Each structure stands twice: as structure tokens, then as C-alpha cells.
Image: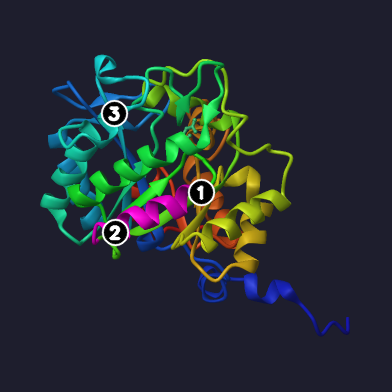
Amino acid sequence: MDLLQRPRRLRSTKALRELVAETRISPSQLMYPAFVRAGITAPEPISALPGQYQHTLDSIRALARELVEAGVGGIDLFGVPLPEQKDAIGSNAWAEAGILNQGISAIREEVGDALVICADTCLDEFTSHGHCGVVRDDGTVDNDATLPLYAKMALSQAQAGAHMVSPSGMMDGQVRYIRQALDVAGFSDVAIMAYSAKYASAFFGPFRGAVGSTLKGNRRTYQQDPANRKEGLREALLDISEGADIVMVKPASHYLDVVADVAATVQVPVAAYQVSGEYAMLEAAAAKGWIDRERAIQESLISIARAGADVILTYWALEVAKRSGVER
Ligand code: PBG
């Protein structure tokens, strides 16, 4: 057999495979999405996200320390206020005493700069109607009336100690508006990770339970249509022109084409968010014994990185970091 090219040669031992692996996952590129909830005295398990919790201010501190010890790159924090703290404009979102800002301060005090502390900058957890912005009398979401509220929220998060804010509401102009507000207030070093290509996805389902969402209806007038690929790149480029430091594609696994397009085009870091539904599906199949849980987790993350994501937001961040170096 006269065969010069034998790709199998480089697959023959584990050491060889690892030597030539094109993609590796490092804990420092992972961000852990976490929830801090008002009015609870012990961490509350999230039923649709087995292994994930709504945290108290104390347990979120302990979690942050654990993340640092495991070498995880960052935390992306979401707040769950009391039901009676919600109102039509989501004003608890920018209250200094609001649960999200309290959570940010607690984490910053606990770990300082050892972890990138990122805050979700969106009103949906704080509005009585559950939409990401101000709702007009006719039920539509008012883009321009929402922007000043995002700016207030981002500013309060910077004041609480966030290194990075993360607008996820998909209002046009949100990055520019927030950048300007931060700069005017002297927070020019606070970075913006923009949820740029965020699709109206069924895979957000478990998250809505995790934050006690009150949403009725859907977000299809502001989040993107899953059918649209070019539009994902357009959104990312727009956000960069508005001052985004990192652009994100979300969800991750079903949108790897968009991740790849964005990664091939932009000159800023690209993040991808492996969302609650991606986590829940795999956990459920593993619980049934239908899938090798750890291999499937690793493969899912490798695939997202292979598509071009530099930063990966995943509910498995802590677990994977603790296990890093494990066989693929
Ligand atoms: C909105 C927001 C959502 C998620 C992150 N930020 C939900 C939504 O848009 O309905 C989903 C995250 C996940 O599913 O893991 N602020």
C-alpha cells in the first residue's frame, strides 16, 4: 500500500492526540452565570437546572471564592428581586439596595479583581410584566424610552463594583447609550460585553424559571429570528461600532454558524452563551443514562470554542474548571 497521507497516525495515542489538538478549553476563558435572590436564607435549587442554585448574598460570596480557586475567568450575575419589588419600569434594577447591585458589591468585596465580575444589564428580572424594556399602552416595547433606564442600571452596576456590564435586552443603540453614560460618569474602564446576536430562543426556557420571570407572550419584536444568520453578524458589527468590547452570540450550540461568522469577521473577543436549555437537555439525558455526561459536556464546549468563541458562558464552568485536563 503506497499511502503517504495517513491522518490516523496522529490519533494513535492519547498523548499524540493531545499534542495536536486544535482546540483546548481553559478555565480562564469560562464565565459562570449565577443568580442571587432577595429574601432567601439558604441557596435554593433551581428545578429545571439541576446542580444550579439561586444564591443568598452569603452563598454568592462563597461561590465567587470557589470560582477563583478553580481558575474560572469570570462570573455573570443575575438578580432575582422579591415579587413586590418589581414595577413597570424595573426600578429595583438600579437601586443601590437592589439585590443585583448588592450581589455585585458582595462579590467585589470578597474577591476583588481576581475574578471578572460581570453584571447582566437588562430589566426583565425587575419589571412586573417581564419584558426587557418599557411597555407602551398598546403592549409594544418602547426602544428609546428603555435606553436611559439601561444607562442608569449600568451606572449603578459600575458603582457597585462590576468590571463589566452586559446589556442583554436587544434594544437598538443600547451599547452606545451605556458607553456614553459610563464614560461621562468616569467609568471608562468598565467594559461592555454586548449580547449582540441574541435570538428569540426556546432554549431560554429553564432560565425563565430560574429568575422567576413573569413574562407572558414572547420577545420576538426585540430578540432575533432564529432564521437569520447575516443579521447576527450585522448586530455584532453594529455593537462594535457603538463601543462594545466583547460581542456575544446566544444561544451557542444551535448558532455555531453565527459564532463562526462573527469570529471570522470581528477584531474583538467573541463570547458565546451556552444557555439554560442547552444545559438542561444534556443533564436530563445524562440523568436517564442515555448519554455520557462528562464527555458530552466537554464535547459541547469544545465545539463552541472550535467555532471561534474566545469566551464561553456556561453553567458547567465551575465543574469543568475543577476537572480541567480530563480526557476528551
Ligand atoms: C434576559 C436574559 C435571558 C437569558 C439571559 N439574559 C432570558 C431571556 O432573554 O428571556 C437566558 C439565559 C439562559 O437561558 O441561560 N435578561
Q: Is residue 198 visible?
A: yes
- 25 or 222: which is nearer to us? 222
Residue 312: % across, % down = 46, 54
Whichever of labels 2 and 3 marks the residue nearer the N terminus, that label is 3
| Residue span colored magenta | 174-186
Is label 2 in contact with label 3 (beta carbons under 8 Å)? no
Does 81 lie within the magenta span? no
Q: Secondary structure at mark 1?
A: loop
Mark closest to the chain's N terminus, 1 or 3: 3
158 with respect to 207 (left or right): left
Residue at 37%, 20% in the rendered image: 88
Residue at the disc numbered 2:
184
Q: Secondary structure at mark 3?
A: helix
Residue 245 higher or lower than 102, as above or below: below
Comparing 15 with 61, the one in front is: 61
Distance between mark 2 and mark 3 Cα atoms: 21 Å
Local crowd at mark 3 within 10 Å, few (<14), some, or many (≥20)?
some
For residue 120, side relative to residue 134 (left or right): left
Please name the residue that numbered disc 3 is placed on. 91
- Visible residue check, residue 323: no
Q: Is residue 57 left or right of residue 67?
A: left
> Is 262 placed above or below 105 here?
below
Q: Is residue 220 above or below residue 236?
A: above
Three-letter amino acid code at the position of disc 1: Gly
Mark 1 is surrounded, within 10 Å at the Cα level, by few (under 14), some (14 to 19) or many (20 or more) other residues, namely some
